[in-house]
Amino acid sequence: MVIGHPSLSKNIPLPRGEGLERMEELDGEEGGKGIESIGKRAENKSSGRRRENMGSLTNKQPRIFSGHHGNALAPCTRTHQIGALFLVVVTFFLTRLFHQSFSPCTATSFGGTDLSSGRSLVRISDAGYLFWPNRGYGSVLSLKIYVYEETEIDGLKELMRGRDGKISADACVKGQWGTQVKIHKLLLKSGFRTKRKEEADLFFVPTYVKCVRMTGGLNDKEINQTFVKVLSQMPYFRRSGGRDHVFVFPSGAGAHLFRSWATFINRSIILSPEGDRTDKKDITAFNTWKDIIIPGNVEDGMTVRRPTTVEPLPLSKRKYLANYLGRAQGKAGRLKLIEMSEKFPDKECVPVILSDQAEFPFQNVIDYSQISIKWPSSRIGPELLNYLESIPDRDIQRMIANGRQIRCLWVYGPESQPCSTMQGIMWELQRKVRQFHQSHETFWLHNQTIVNRNLVEFSKWEPPMPLP
């Protein structure tokens, strides 16, 4: 139900072309009286009922919404309408002109082609600085993230250290598991971190559950039970239904590491390096609207620039057409690649994107067609090898050069670095920030006080509490 101005409570259709003429008829004295009388009738009709219904909530006499306040409305003529319309148009064009004059950067493609006509991509300056496009992101990073402490909530430490507390962060920093640890550590040192929950835009929940599970710290049942216990103690999670809470789930399992994810964190923001993973019921834990695909973890020694760093071989000196690293694991596409490597030992396998449903990091601002090839997984065979051999060297060189421009986005580095994975994640998180943080289990009063179903103010909620 919506309570509003009595004169706006119904939509009264007017014949085509008669809208302005009918408005002019109401502009005069009789029209003003008509509006006044409508407001008074609505006031008289509803005042008794409102006093009866609202008397238990306040001792003050309730205010009635009416269409008249004080003196009669001033007449609005066609001249006034035209003048107002002209003012709106002038303001619009001046605002656009001002915005364009002071825009901090121009959207360009990897090769320097101007894409401001409709496409907006990330841009790296000659000095290595990252410029994110304004469209949908804003001109500067401006967000505040609260990071839960592992001792703040009963059970959170177990999700990071195991039931015995013996698993260290250093033991979990390698492989895909490392994304959970690295993002957590970098956020603890981030300038965007806040220690005040009431001013936070987002809440980061640190867990190392993939590492904890694989090293025997917790089994699947314990992980599920501990997650539920942790979430039930978070008033701010309850307030938003989890919409402003961020979780990292590395590896192909994704959020399925938490078996009840679909019940409890299906509204939360999930960071995962793989977005096409599904369980046996064919239910994906990745949602393109709210979740973020992040780069997989790369060993620090491979990304830190040193004088002894091995540079890629020139294309003319490369021995193989392509290379494949990984395990078959019974996957049909991978088995086909293994079979091809046996038939064509001089070709080896090919690291072309062969996962049809794959989602990629920062795909809102990176045009992957400029740096990679995606081939149908159903057409893996000699046809693919022939296609790769047919690509001119100049096209391969162009794609390699484009990739080098943005490879810094795959490095988990501190904010002091001009371009890093964390900067990209921060920009993507900024797009997820909501001004409104409430859920279907929260309610608000006339002075913006947030309450629960029992009208208890948010500041007085006491965990543990039922989950939404």
Image: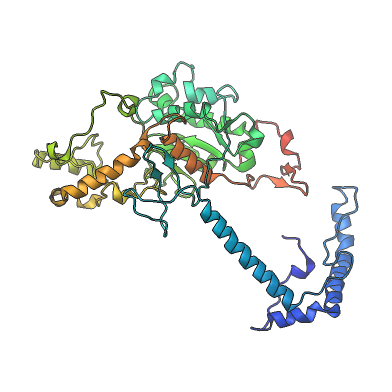
- For the residue pair 195 and 77, the one nearer the viewer reads as 77
Visible residue check, residue 249: no
Q: Residue at x 47, y 21 (%)?
A: 161
Measured from the top left, where is residue 197 in percent x and y?
Answer: 64, 33
Q: Would you identify the image quadrant in which residue 53 lies?
A: bottom right
Visible residue check, residue 110: yes
Side of 31 relative to 461 (left or right): right
Q: Residue at x 76, y 80 (%)?
A: 24
- Farthest front residue in view: 101
Q: Would you identify the image quadrant in which residue 438 lies?
A: top right
- For the residue pair 295 and 102, the one nearer the viewer reads as 102
Side of 23 relative to 352 (left or right): right
- For the residue pair 247 and 193, the one nearer the viewer reads as 193
Quadrant the N terminus occupies:
bottom right
Measured from the top left, where is residue 436 in percent x and y?
Answer: 63, 47
388 over 221 or under it: above or below: below
Measured from the top left, where is residue 236 in percent x and y?
Answer: 63, 36
Measured from the top left, where is residue 156 in percent x and y?
Answer: 54, 26
Quadrant the C terminus occupies:
top right
